[in-house]
Amino acid sequence: MSIPFSEDELIARLFAPIAGPGGLALKDDAALIQPPPGHDLVATTDAIIASVHFFPDDPPESVARKALRVNLSDLAAKGADPLGFLLTLALPPDLPGDWLERFAAALGDDARAYGIDLVGGDTVRTPGPAMISVTALGQVPSGRMVSRAGAKPGDILFVSGTIGDAALGLKARLGGGSLAGLSGNARAALAARYLEPQPRNALARAMRDCANGGMDVSDGFVGDVTKMLAASGASGRIDLREVPLSVAAREAIRFDPTLFETAVTGGDDYELLASIAADRAADFEAMALAAGVPVTRVGAVLPGAVAPTFLGLDGAQTIFTRGSFSHF
Amino acid sequence: MSIPFSEDELIARLFAPIAGPGGLALKDDAALIQPPPGHDLVATTDAIIASVHFFPDDPPESVARKALRVNLSDLAAKGADPLGFLLTLALPPDLPGDWLERFAAALGDDARAYGIDLVGGDTVRTPGPAMISVTALGQVPSGRMVSRAGAKPGDILFVSGTIGDAALGLKARLGGGSLAGLSGNARAALAARYLEPQPRNALARAMRDCANGGMDVSDGFVGDVTKMLAASGASGRIDLREVPLSVAAREAIRFDPTLFETAVTGGDDYELLASIAADRAADFEAMALAAGVPVTRVGAVLPGAVAPTFLGLDGAQTIFTRGSFSHF
């Protein structure tokens, strides 16, 4: 627009109205966080940058939702309920006219929807691309945070929702030739998953009540499973035929079977991976059902500090050339 | 260097060794924060960007210290003791060879020196300038956070240390003509204050025990005093002849008396402003003395929701054309 007001005016006009009580109307240098007695605090931070993590012409509403939700997904994976977040905006001088107004309005709506309060932040000018960095704080009953390192041999591995939609959505958007014939419905469904993550905060309680280990799937299913098992000092056996795929993803893979690998190694799923003791698996499934989030058994945790085995569509062991997508 | 390893390798090699226990060796998606019972958590975030907040050729050690210390200063102003911090790095591909190693080593040393643990973060690639964003978490006994809005008529206004050095240091560095004749010592002293803030965390306890209101002076003394009084719904009378100046700043102002205005309106001081009830002023001074931090009485808080009065060097009321420096 070039930004038409000072940092103070910008905060007062756009962000103070969406701030929560701990944000002190964003008029202080710091936020006050009061986790209830008997709770630990969980903190996570993720940043997104124009032309790296989103397209510069993505709607500002979608950018706001992505910036917040990638962090909400980490809280959910840890079994934490959202508490508050700090927002750092680095803004270039050439933002379109109403970009910030639309961004702030959507962010406020999303914060309300997920029950997380904007409590502070920083706004700086940059000569580079727009960057939105969120630090999200959540709460868990003391000692109950779900660790990435907690998977135990004998556990059953679960994943929520469906895998691969976002990676296929990005591919369709970039105009991958093999997806040219995809139906409009399938294309829209996949594109939406790339544009706006749907974090599984509804599953947080089931995670903290049932999971020995967990993380969110954000850098690719195969790579993230491998990471969790390595962090846990365990191995595993994952049957990729069990990985849940959406109708749209199955349509895309019918067009081009090589896209199956894209689906299970691509990023931006923002589903949850959970390692659940066998005698807790039924409870986890029941709690997930009650929370309205589908969960699927995809494998087992095995003893041994060796890389897990992945069984491909033909039932044979599969080696991945690229286990995970790294944004860096 | 162009960065020679993946995000995971970078974290494992450079940042995990400097992480605190809550950081779970930076192998998880989130940090665990356990404020002691009876304490509130204070959260603040500040970002610095190359060629906006620091010079691209500043030593990486200084960039690390500035990134952390601007946040430590906010914690000190709130009366909070450092607990942990999350670090977001947006890095361009053309960083010099050992930049990150030097940055991480200095950051680790500084974190130890100030007693704050690296507990998490995010590392992303950017086509733009380097950006370092820190979210710092501190702890304060419940209900004792010092608010910017807490100044009360009848309070005495204090400021720590000396004001203006950093703004004059920036001016000297940019080669302001009037500072060409400054002695090498004075130039070095001022430049050092711009390059590396010296946050007043030693004063945190005195702040929470004695101050009704407080903030750090980061955007210019005159503007920040005005902001604090406005947030408190109060007015005030500040005698700028009482504002503490360093030997080097006084030397610069002798060269060019107009630099006095630069000193009291420039930014990057990272001193503390405290509003202290008259019957607590002596205690505050005694605690500051014990903490080794000079504090100076500079004015008084008055009733009324009008802008405060500043008395200039001639004892007459001064109007500032630019009360404060805004980075935005």
Image: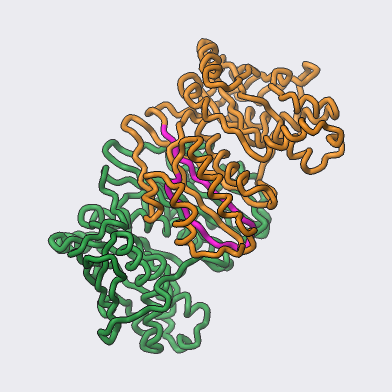
Chain colours: A orange, B green
Measured from the top left, where is residue A181 in percent x and y?
A: 86, 33
| Chief SS of the magenta region | strand
Q: Residue most toward the left?
A: B279
The relative height of residue A259 versus residue B190 in the rendered view (above or below) is: above
Q: Is B10 within the magenta? A: no
Q: Is A134 within the magenta? A: yes
Residue A222 lies left or right of residue A177; in this view the side is: left
Measured from the top left, where is residue B328 in percent x and y?
A: 51, 64
Q: Is residue A246 visible?
A: yes
Extent of the magenta region: A118-139
Measured from the top left, where is residue A228 in percent x and y?
A: 58, 29
The relative height of residue B111 versus residue A146 in the rendered view (above or below) is: below
Measured from the top left, where is residue B137 in percent x and y?
A: 39, 47
Q: Quadrant of the N terminus of chain B?
A: bottom right
- Residue situated in front as seen by the camera: B259 or A12: A12
- Residue situated in front as seen by the camera: A11 or B182: A11
Residue A214 lies left or right of residue B118; in this view the side is: right
Q: Quadrant of residue B74?
A: bottom left
Total numbered labels: 0
- Residue situated in front as seen by the camera: A220 or A83: A83
Q: Quadrant of residue B279?
A: bottom left
Residue B159 lies left or right of residue A237; in this view the side is: left
Q: Quadrant of residue B32?
A: top left
Residue shown at the point (27%, 87%) measured from the top left: B314
Residue shown at the point (64%, 58%) measured from the top left: A96
Residue shown at the point (46%, 20%) measured from the top left: A209
Q: Is residue B1 visible?
A: no
